Image: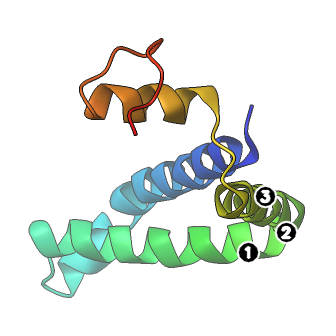
Amino acid sequence: MRPWIVYSLLRFGIFAALFALLVVFLRLPLQSMGIAGFAHYMIAALAAAIISLAISYIFFAKLRAAVATDLAERRARAARGEVDDDTAEEDALLDGETPGDPPRA
């Protein structure tokens, strides 16, 4: 699996878990301060985003570097004019050609 998919899924999973925990455990302290409803969820989402960012920054440095390397390789291939099969097929469909046709001049 590509590293950016793994990295994105890990970050989203950490965010979702933290958000669920914060929604449950921040309910009483926030209600005692008069904060309820939509603001409660926004505070939980903001806190989960910041904490998950810190966790991914500290613990997933190797995976983040792999994502950066993959993106750099993709940019280098694009700069050289190399196109993978999926991109060529998509371009052909957008140009109104069937994928097996030779490109128009």
Mark 1 element type:
helix
Which residue has dot 1 on it? 57
**Of residues 39 and 101, which is closer to you in this image?**
101
Which residue has dot 3 on it? 73
Is residue 63 toward the left or the right of residue 16 in the image?
right
> What is the quadrant of the C terminus in the image?
top left
**Residue at 59% across / 50% down in the picture?**
8
**Residue at 59% across / 43% down in the picture?**
9
Q: Quadrant of residue 11?
A: bottom right
What count of labels does the image hold? 3
Q: Which mark is residue 46?
A: none
Is residue 76 toward the left or the right of residue 97 in the image?
right
Label 2: few (<14), some or many (≥20) within 10 Å? few
Q: Nearer the viewer, mark 2 or mark 3?
A: 3
**Of residues 66 and 38, which is closer to you in this image?**
66
Q: Nearer the viewer, mark 3 or mark 1?
A: 3
**Of residues 83 and 37, which is closer to you in this image?**
83
Mark 2 element type:
helix
Is residue 6 toward the left or the right of residue 90 in the image?
right
Which residue has dot 2 on it? 61
